[in-house]
């Protein structure tokens, strides 16, 4: 556990330094094919949705739609990105840089010996905690043995070890070194985003050579497939999700080909000693393909109709249970995608929506006890395994995200400024829960900070949906329920952007929306100030006229002097309001005042009174 804490300290130290965008990687990010880029427009109507034949409606589309509903066009910003400060290597990134330099020099000997054994064990343990527990496609125990065994400090005759003939199942020494360096590159991103620029040229070169080799050779090598998966994971965390999707799709097709040629047998022989069983390898790749297909709005590499098998994994570990649960989730997602691509058919579409939502809720409810996430409990690193906590959290967030996709599409099916009221309540509630969970995660742990890309994906889905609800509501009073969540989400992205180029690019995409929300902030501050002044004048007038000023008097003023304010500068909900309740209580007399006092017509209106409650839902 101590070696894991070492890497955690490295990561936290790096985050506090405030890394900025790496220019080399930012220039290499590919635009996602078929996804509209957020842009300002003078037209208040929503953009025409892309043809469903060309893909699903992704979060980018809904962010653009929310932007058009929230704000008019503004001149493009003339601000330029801050220049990167002088490079200050941190231990794990320094190791990566030196290893790659040593590898590039083509010197003889064991490349991995540059890093001592204890450090390698901590690197692999940290990888297992962050990635391996979710996607156990590597035999990490065998990798540890291979890395340590050939260390000349532990081997009396290194030449003898290296010259021993190996079986087909044994990966080559070059493959072992490449796998180890890939793992170091991935966890280096979690510690310092500048590692992307250091590792990227070598990763791309190795990836290209491995792709060519796997496409030409008649025998599929398991170690090469593991290299391709690791490269895809690196691309994903360096914010190149389309490239990750391409890579994992190639691997899934190769595995499907191997299964078809061997009468359904998923076993691999060449290089198989470094990989998990063929069964586990296949389903890990399957879940990654589904995950990144939904994230990029691109097709699955192999459709479920072409897969005539079910996972046969032992559920003796949280990792295997997670993979099994994700396979079930992915099969629901396949049905969701099929429904999204079908033409709208009125009540029949609503019935399908409700059934799919029911399936997601039941999937979440029927997860094994060890995979159930309890949102009421804080993460305690001393008592809870970090990796197991993460997979419970991820399953919880994935259930929310799929429900958001279902209800967001249904709510916006009419492509108008008004969302379908039959589904918008659920959309707002689930988006609210996701935002609150992620804000708390970032505030209380370093889990979010380690994998910006992973958790930004959930935050973006929830924020785009919350903004869509916010922008479609004509009554300002009802906007109060989601305005605070939207502010909290954007402010979280702002904080994260200080240490991550991935989050910085997301913040850039939200520029116009952020400007529109700033106007809400200003309006909220003015409304709060004016409400305070009105309350004071009212109290003075009542005192002059001889009315009692005790707290039990019935009057059309707030039961508390003015709303509480958040860091966003807007009024917040009462602390004792139910976490999941998406309604508001307000006095009927306040509603009457709103017709005469313009400053009353603001989102903060619904937060003042408990007397004579009028429930507002949407």
Image (cartoon, grey):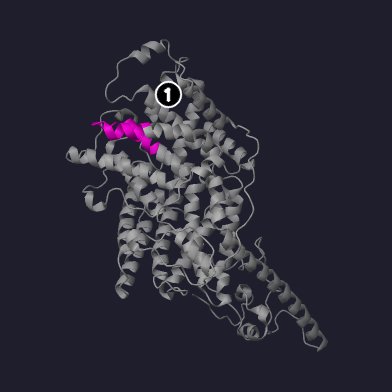
Residue occupying the far bottom of the picture: 545
State the residue in front, 80 or 489: 80
- Can residue 221 be found in the magenta stretch? yes
Dividing the picture into quarters, in which one does residue 72 lie? bottom right
Q: How many marks?
A: 1
Identified at 32% across, 75% down, the residue is 346
Left or right placement of residue 162 versus residue 46 in this view = left
Identified at 46% across, 31% down, the residue is 202
Residue 61 locus on image (x, y percent): 45, 61
Q: Which residue is mark 1?
A: 147
Above or below, comparing residue 89 to residue 560 in the picture: above
Badge 1 marks a residue whose secondary structure is helix
State the residue in front, 12 or 368: 12
Q: Which residues are magenta?
A: 209-230
Above or below, comparing residue 262 to residue 615 in the picture: above
Left or right placement of residue 429 versus residue 352 in this view = right
Residue 420 locus on image (x, y percent): 42, 74
- Can residue 570 be found in the magenta stretch? no
Question: What secondary structure prevails in the magenta region?
Answer: helix
Residue 98 is at least partly visible in this image: yes
Residue occupying the far left of the picture: 263
- Badge 1: how crowded within 10 Å, few (<14), some, or many (20+)? many
């Amino acid at each position: 556990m101590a070696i894991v804490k070492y890497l955690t300290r490295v990561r936290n130290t790096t985050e506090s330094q405030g890394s900025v965008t790496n220019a080399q990687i930012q220039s290499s990010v590919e635009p996602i094919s078929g996804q509209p880029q957020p842009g300002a427009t003078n037209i208040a109507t929503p953009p025409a949705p892309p043809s469903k034949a060309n893909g699903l409606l992704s979060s980018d589309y809904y962010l653009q739609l929310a932007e058009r509903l929230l704000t008019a066009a503004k001149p493009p910003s003339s601000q330029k990105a801050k220049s990167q400060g002088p490079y200050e290597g941190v231990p794990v990134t320094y190791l990566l840089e030196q290893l790659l330099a040593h590898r590039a020099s083509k010197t003889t000997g064991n490349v991995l010996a540059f890093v001592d054994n204890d450090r390698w064990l901590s690197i692999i343990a940290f990888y297992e905690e962050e990635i391996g527990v979710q996607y156990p496609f590597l035999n990490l125990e065998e990798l540890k043995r291979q890395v340590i065994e050939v260390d000349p400090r532990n081997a009396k005759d290194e030449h003898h070890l290296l010259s021993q003939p190996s079986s087909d199942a044994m990966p080559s020494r070059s493959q072992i070194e490449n796998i180890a360096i890939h793992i170091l590159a991935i966890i280096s991103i979690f510690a310092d985003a500048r590692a992307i620029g250091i590792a990227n040229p070598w990763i791309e070169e190795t990836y290209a050579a491995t792709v060519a080799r796997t496409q030409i050779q008649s025998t599929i090598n398991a170690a090469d497939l593991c290299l391709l998966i690791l490269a895809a994971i690196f691309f994903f965390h360096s914010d190149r999700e389309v490239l990750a999707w391409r890579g994992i799709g190639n691997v899934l097709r190769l595995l499907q080909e191997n299964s078809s040629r061997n009468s359904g047998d998923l076993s691999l022989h060449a290089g198989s000693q470094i990989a998990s069983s063929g069964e586990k390898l296949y389903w890990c790749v399957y879940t990654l393909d589904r995950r990144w297909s939904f994230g990029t709005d691109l097709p699955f590499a192999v459709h479920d109709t072409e897969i005539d098998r079910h996972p046969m994994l032992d559920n003796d570990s949280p990792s295997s249970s997670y993979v099994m649960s994700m396979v079930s989730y992915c099969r629901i997602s396949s049905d969701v995608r099929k429904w999204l691509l079908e033409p709208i058919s009125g009540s029949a579409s609503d019935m399908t929506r409700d059934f799919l939502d029911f399936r997601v809720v039941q999937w979440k409810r029927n997860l094994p006890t060890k995979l159930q996430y309890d949102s009421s409990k804080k993460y305690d690193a001393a008592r809870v395994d970090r990796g197991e906590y993460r997979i419970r959290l991820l399953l919880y967030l994935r259930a929310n995200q799929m429900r958001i996709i279902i209800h967001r599409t249904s709510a916006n099916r009419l492509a108008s400024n008004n969302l379908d009221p039959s589904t918008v309540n659920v959309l707002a509630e689930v988006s609210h829960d996701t935002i609150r969970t992620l804000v708390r995660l970032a505030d209380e742990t370093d889990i979010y900070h380690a994998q910006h890309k992973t958790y930004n994906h959930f935050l973006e889905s929830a924020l785009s949906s919350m903004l869509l609800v916010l922008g479609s509501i004509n009554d300002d009073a009802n906007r109060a329920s989601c305005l605070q969540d939207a502010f909290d989400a954007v402010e979280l992205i702002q904080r994260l952007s200080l240490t991550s180029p991935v989050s910085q690019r997301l913040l850039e995409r939200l520029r116009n929306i952020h400007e529109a929300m700033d106007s809400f902030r200003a309006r909220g501050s003015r409304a709060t100030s004016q409400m305070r002044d009105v309350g004071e004048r009212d109290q003075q007038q009542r005192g002059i006229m001889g009315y009692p000023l005790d707290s039990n008097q019935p009057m059309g003023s707030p039961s508390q002097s003015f709303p509480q304010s958040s860091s966003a500068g807007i009024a917040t909900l009462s602390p004792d309001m139910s976490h999941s309740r998406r309604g508001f209580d307000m006095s009927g007399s306040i509603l009457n005042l709103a017709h005469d006092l313009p400053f009353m017509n603001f989102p903060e209106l619904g937060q003042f009174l408990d007397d004579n409650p009028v429930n507002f839902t949407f």
